[in-house]
Image (cartoon, grey):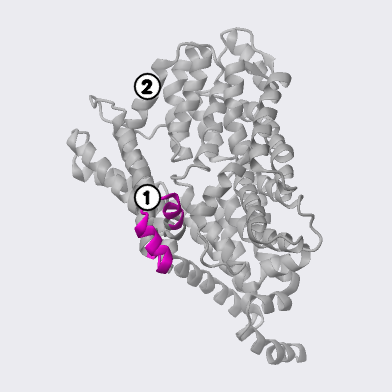
């Protein structure tokens, strides 16, 4: 054994054995950045988030073991360390509830699709379209209605609305844009969706890194909604272009071409992207209630579950006050704050599944065995989300043990301007998401770094209490929204590809026409959204100004499309 090895083993081994994250941050120094940097770099290089997260976790578990072991044993223990962290993540009751909620909502979506509920709503909306403007608004409304999943949005809205937009000589590029711009942006802010489990889980983990274990992560998620500037402004942008009939950039040329009867560039081949196994059988009556009833049960059931879950958790004076005034605003605030969101959402999704199965069997759409098969198929569609969740949780645990957040905080908290951080997080999230084509993976990589850094920067500038909480909300929003912005621009994003296919639009045509709009709205989100709020402007002033800026963008940059 060399003198250096002997020195490391005798001096540092006892420290490592009992080290906490702060001690590890001092020992490892800049090496604590390896797991997130490896995950981010590989995400750019490989465009594969699962592989990038896996290797990022492995680099951390390898680093933890390298001081105590030789290289060979560090590889072995690094691998077994990944397994232990994944199993530990699954064993956590909160995480288990999140996974079950995500899977179960996938099952509800599959049942609703099989019963023809979403198709019935789409057909009802299509009958209301009398002009090109109303056709675009109907497509937008259909996208809003399919709020629970971005994939379902792309798979359902395009094939249903394509004949309607063709009838009014709207370009396939514009249809693809509306589909794409109401997929992730609405699913990302919906209070019940296949996204919310991932989002609230990452928020909870991020707060755990700064020592806050009992945070109401679902409540934090709700608070971020007004600060999700790109999502909100993009949804409004679609309405502005439709109502004012103004476009700019490549989309203007596409719309002018479509008005001449050339609905697409000629390079497109319409592909049937609908999953025929989830199509309703021939002869089944399409009814709007097949979608509306299960979704209402899901939403109302979630609120009821939140209430009783929180009520069960209250103690002492808070419980007495809640029982004395069970329906007061104060009681709802307390119960929702104390609720276990993972369990409440799983309960409501499970009950909605039972209602959907009962409706389908009662209306002779399928029998019980087939219904359960459809429900399980819906679970299978969410496996990719579960894999990303498990790896994101594992990366978070590695980062916590190494003290990455502590090192990053110590290095940057004294030098980063408070007003710059949300913009920097938004832009970094955009780059990662653009390069990887996924919002989920970007959130998993960035959230464990953003929350501790925002907390430290806020404290360094003397923020505390409500002011610090508000600053944290802005930065969390920047992670969640930047991930969606980059995904929206990315040519390798699955929702971008599905939107092209659903609209029957050449993929490169869709990307080239959409990216100018996405960048424009992204600029509004930065300069009229995140910068003013980071400087202390009220959200209720910033939001109207942002909507006004979005309207002005269409009105003064856009040109009238001649009909």
Spatial CA span between label 2 and label 1: 39 Å
Q: Residue at x 61, y 46 (%)?
A: 483
Residues packed near mark 2 inside 10 Å, few (<14), some (14 to 19) or many (20 plus): some
- Towards the viewer: 198 or 62: 198
Image quarter of residue 472: bottom right
Asked if residue 490 can be seen in this view, the reply is no
Q: Measuring from the top left, give residue 279's x and y in whole percent.
A: 32, 32
- Towards the viewer: 262 or 92: 92
Q: Measuring from the top left, give residue 480's x and y in whole percent.
A: 59, 48
Q: Residue at x 19, y 38 (%)?
A: 361
Q: Measuring from the top left, give residue 530's x and y in whole percent.
A: 70, 44
Instruction: Locate residue 266 relative to residue 346 in the image: left or right.
Output: right
Boundaries of the magenta span: 313-334
Image quarter of residue 239: top right
Give the residue pinned by disc 1.
327
Secondary structure character of the magenta stretch overall:
helix
- In the image, residue 240 above or below residue 363: above
The quarter of the picture where the N terminus appears is bottom right
């Amino acid at each position: 054994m060399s003198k250096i090895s002997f020195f490391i083993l005798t001096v540092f081994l006892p420290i490592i054995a009992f080290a906490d994250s702060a001690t590890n941050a001092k020992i490892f120094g800049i090496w604590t950045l390896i797991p997130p940097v490896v995950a981010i770099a590989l995400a750019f290089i490989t465009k594969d988030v699962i592989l990038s997260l896996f290797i990022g976790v492995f680099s951390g578990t390898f680093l933890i073991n390298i001081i105590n072991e030789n290289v060979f044993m560090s590889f072995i223990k690094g691998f077994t360390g990944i397994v232990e962290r994944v199993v530990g993540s699954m064993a956590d009751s909160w995480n288990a509830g999140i996974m079950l909620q995500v899977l179960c909502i996938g099952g509800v979506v599959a049942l609703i699709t099989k019963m023809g509920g979403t198709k019935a709503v789409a057909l009802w909306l299509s009958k209301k379209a009398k002009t090109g403007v109303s056709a675009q608004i109907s497509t937008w409304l259909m996208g809003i209605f399919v709020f629970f999943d971005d994939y379902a949005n792309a798979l359902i809205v395009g094939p249903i609305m394509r004949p309607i937009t063709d009838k009014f000589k709207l370009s396939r590029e514009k249809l693809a844009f509306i589909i794409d711009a109401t997929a992730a942006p609405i699913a990302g802010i919906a209070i019940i969706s296949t996204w919310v489990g991932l989002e609230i889980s990452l928020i909870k983990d991020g707060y755990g890194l700064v020592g806050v274990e009992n945070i109401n992560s679902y409540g934090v998620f709700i608070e971020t909604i007004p600060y999700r500037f790109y999502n909100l402004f993009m949804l409004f942008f679609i309405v502005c272009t439709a109502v004012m009939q103004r476009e700019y950039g490549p989309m203007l040329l596409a719309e002018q071409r479509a008005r001449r009867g050339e609905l697409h560039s000629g390079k497109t081949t319409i592909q049937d992207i609908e999953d025929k196994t989830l199509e309703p059988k021939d002869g089944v009556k399409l009814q709007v209630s097949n979608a509306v009833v299960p979704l209402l049960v899901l939403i109302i059931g979630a609120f009821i579950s939140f209430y009783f879950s929180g009520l069960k958790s209250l103690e002492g004076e808070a419980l007495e006050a809640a029982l004395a005034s069970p329906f007061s605003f104060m009681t709802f605030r307390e119960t929702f704050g104390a609720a276990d969101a993972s369990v409440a959402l799983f309960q409501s999704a499970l009950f909605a599944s039972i209602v959907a199965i009962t409706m389908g069997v009662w209306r002779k759409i399928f029998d019980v065995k087939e219904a359960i098969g459809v429900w399980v198929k819906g679970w299978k569609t969410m496996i990719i989300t579960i894999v990303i969740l498990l790896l994101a949780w594992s990366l978070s645990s590695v980062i916590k043990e190494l003290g990455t957040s502590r090192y990053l905080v110590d290095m940057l908290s004294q030098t980063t301007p408070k007003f710059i951080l949300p913009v920097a997080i938004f832009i970094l999230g955009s780059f990662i998401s653009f390069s990887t084509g996924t919002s989920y993976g970007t959130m998993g990589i960035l959230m464990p770094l953003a929350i501790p850094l925002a907390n430290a920067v806020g404290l360094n500038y003397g923020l505390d209490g409500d002011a610090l909480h508000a600053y944290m909300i802005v930065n969390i929003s920047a992670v969640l929204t930047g991930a969606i912005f980059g995904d929206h621009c990315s040519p390798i994003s699955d929702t971008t590809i599905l939107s092209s296919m659903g609209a029957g639009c050449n993929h490169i045509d869709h990307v080239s026409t959409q990216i100018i709009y996405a960048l424009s709205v992204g600029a509004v989100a930065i300069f009229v959204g995140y910068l003013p709020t980071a400087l202390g402007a009220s959200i209720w002033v910033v939001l109207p100004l942002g909507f006004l800026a979005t309207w002005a963008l269409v009105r003064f940059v856009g040109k009238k499309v001649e009909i």
